[in-house]
């Protein structure tokens, strides 16, 4: 009986482990999707040497020539004709090299005919299905031509091609946008579209981590390292932040750190007895002193914070944000942490009211 009971326990453990492994595999990108991520990111950055390696790895992993061409063609809508054309040229040259070596790459499926009717009509329908609702806004009222181009050309003529499914197209789009600075709003929009079309949170995290080269998947918005999740000060922040200490020699008496905030994240009201300096280096953020209007921050902006002045700083609602934090008078400087910035006060500060 003991042997039977032990066997039952071991069998149950085996089933649980297998279920967990199957779930992990289901949540992970497959090998071809990971290669598409690398190809899209290199294309968006204009990194031709790395792109050549990524293209070769993609072909070796089973991507067809037409799948790769479709990804590179689609990306012109997100990173421009020059980088799309350069990437296609690199792909063409690589295929010739491989052919000369006797490598026969699979051409794959060509796109079928576009749906019947006008591109603007089926493109609008595609966009609505992709996003889960009709897409409208003041920007499109201001520039109706761009709305027409998006609907008719991008979501009609490009997304109407059937040799690459929408989920795969969104994986490529998310990777490309994650590789480019200053497009956080578009990246967040396409993350939402990707999730609506079957890309899981785990897969999005994998894309961002692969593109940005850090375990947290934080977008690369500045030249400075992201560091580690700022767990030591998490209780003083609304949302997640990341901290990278840049200076190591205490004899210099100039502690400098790079602080990165996820969209909507801000620290509590607080003050420093010795003051502080901030230098914005990536994304869009805000700084506010108590009783004053908030100041919008973009890379290059400098904030001089007087001693004993209540203030807060953080990211815009729709953008990641990084700043260098420079501690002044470090030998005597002490922080006093106060109450969180309420959602209502944050909304008022960041909306200009």
Image: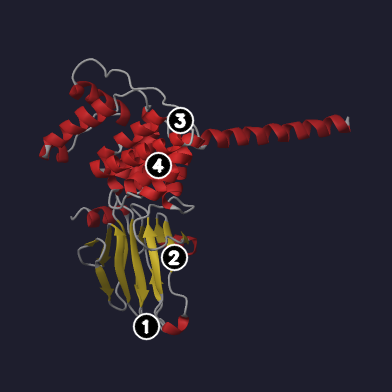
Nearest to viewer (mark 3 / mark 4): 3
Is residue 204 placed above or below 279 in the rendered structure?
above
Judged from the image, the secondary structure of the residue bearing numbered disc 2 is strand
Work out whether mark 3 precedes mark 4 in sequence or the reverse, and give the earlier one.
Answer: 4
Work out whether mark 4 precedes mark 1 in sequence or the reverse, and give the earlier one.
Answer: 4
Quadrant of the rendered structure where residue 158 is?
top left
Q: Work out how far the residue at label 2 is from the one at label 4, CA to CA, in angstroms.
A: 29 Å
| Residue 201 in view here | no
Quarter of the image with the C terminus in it: bottom left
Judged from the image, the secondary structure of the residue bearing numbered disc 3 is loop
Q: Which residue is mark 1?
A: 329
Q: Work out how far the residue at label 4 is from the one at label 1, CA to CA, in angstroms.
A: 47 Å
Q: Is the C-beta separation of discs 2 and 1 under 8 Å?
A: no
The residue shown at (30%, 38%) is 75
Quarter of the image with the N terminus in it: top right
The residue shown at (40%, 41%) is 39
Judged from the image, the secondary structure of the residue bearing numbered disc 4 is helix
Q: Is the C-beta separation of discs 4 and 1 under 8 Å?
A: no
Q: Which residue is mark 4?
A: 39
Quadrant of the rendered structure where residue 349 is?
bottom left
Work out whether mark 3 precedes mark 1 in sequence or the reverse, and give the earlier one.
Answer: 3
Nearest to viewer (mark 2 / mark 3): 3
Label disc, if present, on residue 105 of the rendered structure: 3
Work out whether mark 2 precedes mark 4 in sequence or the reverse, and give the earlier one.
Answer: 4
Nearest to viewer (mark 3 / mark 1): 3
| Residue 99 in view here | yes
Q: Work out how far the residue at label 2 is from the one at label 3, CA to CA, in angstroms.
A: 44 Å
The residue shown at (33%, 75%) is 276
Q: Which residue is mark 2?
A: 244
Along the line of sight, the residue nearer the viewer: 241 or 322: 322
């Amino acid at each position: 009986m003991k042997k039977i009971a032990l066997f039952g326990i071991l069998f149950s453990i085996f089933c649980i482990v297998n279920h967990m492994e199957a779930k992990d595999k289901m949540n992970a990108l497959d090998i071809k999707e990971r290669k598409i991520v690398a190809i899209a990111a290199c294309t968006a950055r204009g990194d031709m040497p790395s792109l050549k390696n990524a293209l070769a790895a993609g072909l070796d992993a089973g991507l067809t020539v037409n799948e790769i061409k479709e990804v590179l063609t689609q990306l012109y809508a997100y990173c421009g004709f020059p980088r799309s054309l350069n990437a296609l040229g690199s792909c063409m040259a690589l295929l010739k090299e491989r052919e000369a070596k006797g490598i026969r790459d699979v051409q794959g499926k060509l796109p079928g005919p576009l749906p019947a009717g006008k591109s603007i009509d089926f493109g609008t329908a595609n966009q609505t299905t992709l996003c889960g609702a009709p897409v409208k806004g003041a920007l499109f009222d201001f520039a109706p031509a761009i709305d027409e181009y998006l609907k008719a050309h991008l979501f009609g003529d490009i997304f109407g091609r059937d040799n690459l499914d929408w989920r795969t197209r969104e994986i490529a789009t998310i990777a490309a946008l994650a590789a480019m600075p200053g497009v956080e709003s578009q990246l967040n929009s396409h993350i939402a579209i990707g999730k609506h079309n079957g890309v899981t949170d785990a897969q999005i995290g994998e894309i961002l981590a692969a593109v940005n080269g850090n375990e947290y998947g934080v977008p690369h918005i500045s030249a400075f390292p992201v560091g580690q999740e700022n767990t030591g000060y998490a209780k003083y922040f609304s949302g997640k932040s990341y901290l990278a200490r840049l200076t190591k020699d205490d004899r210099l008496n100039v502690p400098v750190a790079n602080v990165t905030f996820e969209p909507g994240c801000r620290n509590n009201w607080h003050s420093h007895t010795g003051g502080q300096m901030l230098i914005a280096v990536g994304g869009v953020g805000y700084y506010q002193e108590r009783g004053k209007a908030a100041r919008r921050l973009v890379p290059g902006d400098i904030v001089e914070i007087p001693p004993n002045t209540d203030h807060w700083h953080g990211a815009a609602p729709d953008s990641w944000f990084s700043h260098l934090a420079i501690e002044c008078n470090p030998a005597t400087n002490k922080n006093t942490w106060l109450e969180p910035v309420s959602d209502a006060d944050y909304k008022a500060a960041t909306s200009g009211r």
